[in-house]
Amino acid sequence: MSVPMPLPAANKKILKGVSLFSSAGIGEAFLKDAGINIAVANELLEDRARLYARLHPNSKMITGDILDEEVFKNVVDSSGDNVDFLIATPPCQGMSMAGKNRDQKTMLSDKRNHLVFKIIEFINIKKPTYILIENVPNFLKLKLPFERGLFTLEEILSTLYKDKYEIEARVMDTSEYGVPQKRNRALIKMQKKGLIWSWPDKQKPISVKEAIGHLPSLESSQNSKIPWHFARKHSDNHILWMKHTPTGKSAFENPKYYPKKSNGRRVKSYMTTYRRIKWDEPAPTITMRNDAISSQLNVHPGTKQKDGTYSDARVLTPLELMILSSLPQKWNLPDDTPEILIRKCLGESVPPLLLKKVVEGIK
């Protein structure tokens, strides 16, 4: 079964919203159903901003660096007198725990990690009734320079707004809220004193089989008649290795058909690469490199064939990725959207059903 498209909230006042660090706006796909109308959005990258404008034609997209005073002023002025809701997802790459960004000192030197102060500046000017800040889990641990010390964003917000806002933060796994994908996200929600905003209840996880099992099987380079359900072209070696890789396993576990270099030596990598996902669990976190078999946990589960090999020796199709991100099969994605762009945007976006469920807690 596919993931059902959320229904609009009944008899709910429409709140005027502003979106900062919007990317392509995938995470905002269901906000209108939850009673939020994003009037103004801002995104730095032009390709994301153009796609946002096409996905959300009723929102004013302001493209440019929010650290630029003219861009920031444009966002503030375009927001009008009253802002009911603010959503902000500052870039998470600077907070990655991988590679060179592992230590606090390096993260502190990354200018992207200081973009949160533009959120604070916006709050000070517009005083939104409700605020939702979303990012990777490490976001809640990162300490930033404030006054004469280093503090987490939650500590900074509490210092600045404890008399004006209720402030609460938590890490949420999207698979516990109706999304057929395991993805941990940090959320900080704020509402003015005296208002109620509750967290959503958890629900039974949805498996990959339940979400995309109805879609036809495809091999490398094949295309179905279903929009966005087409398979990428892979190398002969990648196809060979994955054909001999069972569901839920890595090709590195194969006794014969394992990843090897042209000289025959075994490729050295992690067991999460060249790996098929499982049918009976929610999908693992979708990454920005979901186009590559050699990247992490990207390969279709496949089905065992009569000859002992496994079908679907390929990465997930764009449609499969959309559904596993909680988007409906008939989503309004423009037909001419570049495949790699939508793959990247899905990899960097919070699944929209999680945001919808969080926002529905506004009373």
Image (cartoon, helix red, strand yellow):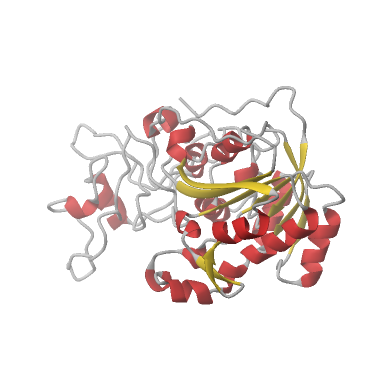
Provide residue 10's location: percent of width, then percent of height: 71, 22
The residue lying at 78 percent from left, 66 percent from top is 71
Q: Position of residue 67 (x, y in %)?
A: 71, 70
Total count of labels: 0
Q: Which of the image's four quarters has the N terminus?
A: top left
Task: Give coordinates of residue 118: x percent, y percent.
Answer: 69, 64
- Where residue 308 sits, quadrant-wise, is top left
Pick the front one: 277 or 359: 359
Give residue 279's quadrant in the image.
top left
- Residue in the foreground of this view, choosing between 233 and 337: 337
The quadrant of the rendering that contains the C terminus is: top right
Camera-nearest residue between 210 and 11: 11
Q: Is residue 5 above or below residue 54?
A: above
Residue furthest to the front in view is 163
Q: Position of residue 7 (x, y in %)?
A: 64, 25
Give the answer, above or below, for where 195 lies relative to 260. Answer: above
Q: Is residue 215 visible?
A: no
Q: At 29% from the left edge and 54% from the top edge, which residue is drawn?
A: 272
Q: Is residue 351 left or right of residue 86?
A: left
Residue closer to the observer: 111 or 230: 111
Residue 31 visible to an observer of this rendering: yes
Residue drawn at (23%, 67%), measured in percent from left and top? 261
